[in-house]
Image: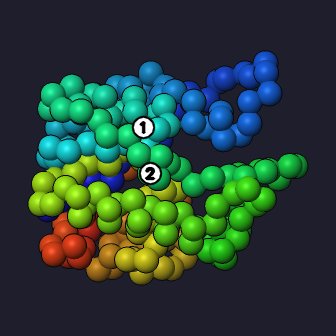
Amino acid sequence: MTLYLVSNNMVLEDLVYETDETVEEKRINRPLSIEGEKKAVKLVKKINANIIYSSNYASALATAKYYARYKNIFININSFLNDSKIGKLGNRNIKMLRFMQERDFDFKFNNGESLNETCNRMNIAINSIIKRIGNQNIVIFTHKRAILGYLLKYLDKGYNLDDRLILTYNDKVIIDDVEKDIDIIKLEILHNKIVDIDIIE
């Protein structure tokens, strides 16, 4: 079977909140930008799956809806596929959190989630989906940090010239700190084991 992991990173940035939403509420409800919607329309032909799963974030669902319409199938929502929880930032920022987590996979802020915890959560969710679905191709619309967490246990770890974490498979970089509009990672799975990983451009 083939598993596609998709992250649409083009979300609306110019938002001003007049009430006291938490960081997590803002992240969950943040919609795609207009460019993100356009990218979501175009990516449907790059995927060949007949089962759709999505996190419950607005950006993931907004991306999934185009593939669901294209294939005329339902979207299964699973909150275990959500992005990694930030926790209480205080006077710190997300960039600093990510830098620290790339050096210590157990590092997290209060009420947040470490990369190892994200790895465990994502693997529980995806392994459960694979066992339930069988040999059908699956696409999961999720988030770059969640994908990083999932792949942490399967890929080789290293650091680039900017001292940022990179994950490689057969010497090919699969995950790095480069900001891409869309991330599509294709995994070939045989007997519940990953036998190949590649990037779809």
Q: Can residue 131 be seen in this view?
A: yes
Secondary element under disc 1, as helix, strand or loop, is helix
Residue beneath disc 2: 81
Residue 42 is labelled as none
The reply to whether the C-beta atoms of the residues labelled 1 and 2 are less than 8 Å apart is yes
Callout count: 2
Could you tell me which residue is drawn at 18 percent across and 32 percent down?
A: 73
Taking depth in this image into account, of 15 and 49 the one nearest to the observer is 49
Q: Work out how far the residue at label 1 is from the one at label 2, CA to CA, in angstroms.
A: 10 Å
Examine the rendered structure and indicate whether residue 119 appears above or below residue 66. below
Residue 88 x, y percent position in the rendering: 79, 51
- Rendered location of residue 11, percent (x, y): 52, 32
Does residue 176 appear in the picture of this structure?
no
* Residue assigned mark 1: 60
Q: Which amino acid does label 1 sit on?
A: Ala
Residue at image position (49%, 63%) is 121
Q: Which amino acid does label 2 sit on?
A: Leu
Q: Is residue 56 left or right of residue 49?
A: right
Q: 65 or 179: which is nearer to us? A: 65
Q: Is residue 179 above or below residue 17?
A: below
Q: Nearer the viewer, mark 1 or mark 2?
A: 2
Q: Which residue lies furthest to the front in this view?
A: 132
Q: Quadrant of the N terminus?
A: bottom left
Between residues 20 and 166, which one lies in front from this camera angle? Answer: 20
Residue at image position (26%, 48%) is: 139
Residue 75 occupies quadrant: top left
Q: Residues within 10 Å of mark 1 (few under 14, many from 20)?
A: many
Residue 81 appears left or right of 83: left
Residue depicted at x 31% and y 28%: 65
